[in-house]
Image (cartoon, rainbow, N blue to C red):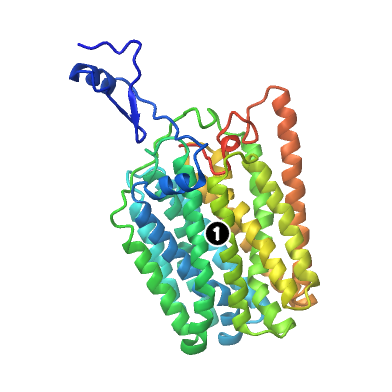
Amino acid sequence: MCSLKGRRAWQWGGAVRPPPHCGLQCWDVLLAAPVTHPAPPTHGSPVRLLLAVLRLPHAARLALSVFLLGFALSLAVPFMALFAVQEAGLSPLQLGIFLSLNAIGAVLMATRLARWSDRWPSRKPLVLLTLAAGAAAYALLAVVRSYPALLVVGAVFLGTGTAAFPQVFSLARAALQEVPGDLAERAMTALRSVFSLSWVVGPGLGALALAHLDFAGVFALASGCFALAALSLLWVPGRPPRATVGPDQPATAEPRRAVLWAALAFVLYGMAMSMGMTFFPLFVTGTLGQSEGLVGVLVGLCALLEIPVMLALVAWRGPPPVARLVTAGMGLFTLHFALLLLAQGTAALVAAQVLRAVVLALLAGLGMTYFQTLMPGRFAAATTLFANTGSLGGMLSGITAGAWAQTFGYRSVFLLCAALTGAAWLLMLWRGQAQGGAMKGGAVKGPDTAETAGAAHPVSAPRG
């Protein structure tokens, strides 16, 4: 029998293998002992890191599903306000009520599904349910024009379909939970960049479909993409989360109050995001007198610019902590809305979309990771909390922005958005300073410290 003392087990491809001179007994000892997979070196070249992410198990199927989900949304969402006003004849206030009911349904369904998802032995049935609801929602929007019926479709079917985003990403994170080191977290940011890639082509094709197929054709295409997204997940395992504490994650979660303050900042961000997305097409076409095609081009440009920023975050070897990047994103979003407020032509709109691309790469790409850092070991709960802040922001913004736009005009909405994101930025700054003071006093370490997952890499999250 060969002794392991003084010897190093071979490491190959993240797995522990016996030295060639060891016998079977030596390998049995290795198998019997608990093995901690070493983290892949974060000092490798960006190309090697990206290739390692692409070779992860189920990466292709997950990427295809995420792309189709994003493509479905990118076809329909940019033109939802135009559909409501031009096709269904809704007033700005009625549009706000419709969007608010959508958000209420999304929050309620996503919260309930998240609780089930972290407890069930397989989360796949819930993921498929949300994708089926999304397919049904857009199939119904292709034919329904009655306002009461639209409210039902929005609250029930669109609300449930909105939960597909956190459910698909929590399924992806659980499917990758055996991956060593921080590759799983890098993969999550890479998947988010795939989601952005779908928005590069989706809005432009949506505008083309709108010109030739009308709103019914756009929504039918979106419905089909939801169905295909579900089909590509049939062979991805729906394993439950396995909570572990390793060297790349904090041993304890953030206090509930810290999580609530972070959630409040993201609700304010979600309000501004929802208002801006809803009234941007109406501002471009109604106030500035530009074409609907320009709306699709600008939205696609933003998504195109997001991708290199997100991929840079995946491969960045020595970044600031996640919380610091998120705070910077809040500040940049304030500048984005200030540019829109002052915009008089296409040049300012393009500049605003460049800023928006950086903001979305930071906040949409790292926001999910940020909440997973605050709530280690709870994939669906953390991802759903992040998604629910956006849904709650949309719910609060719907009636508010509708009444505001009806009273003061479309341009003034961006002043309100700038105020909301400015408040979120100040809140994140205050939270960071308070956390720094608590750390000096010996409090629990948070995501801004080197001992946590976030400090190691901007896409690192606790491996729950």
Q: Which residue is mark 1?
A: 307
Q: Is residue 98 left or right of residue 16?
A: right
Residue 323 seen: yes
Establish if 73 lies above or below 116: below
Who is closer to the viewer here, 460 or 5? 5
Of residues 450 and 144, the one drawn nearer to the viewer in this rendering: 450
Looking at the image, residue 61 lies above or below residue 259: below
Q: Position of residue 303 (x, y in %)?
A: 57, 65
Q: Nearer the viewer, residue 378 or 150?
A: 378
Q: Is residue 261 visible?
A: no
Nearer to me, 162 or 442: 442
- Tell me if 135 is positioned left or right of 450 in this view: left
Specify the amino acid type for callout 1.
Ile
- Secondary structure of the residue carrying tag 1 is helix
**Residue 332 percent coordinates (x, y):** 72, 56
The local crowd at label 1, few if under 14, some if 14 to 19, many if 20 or more residues have their Cα within 10 Å, is many
Task: Locate residue 366, reporting x and y percent.
Answer: 58, 49
Q: Residue at x 47, y 29 (%)?
A: 245
Q: Quadrant of residue 391?
A: bottom right
Q: Can you say which quadrant of the picture contains the C terminus?
A: top left
Label count reads 1
Percent x, y of residue 49: 47, 44
For the point 71% across and 85% down, which residue is it? 289
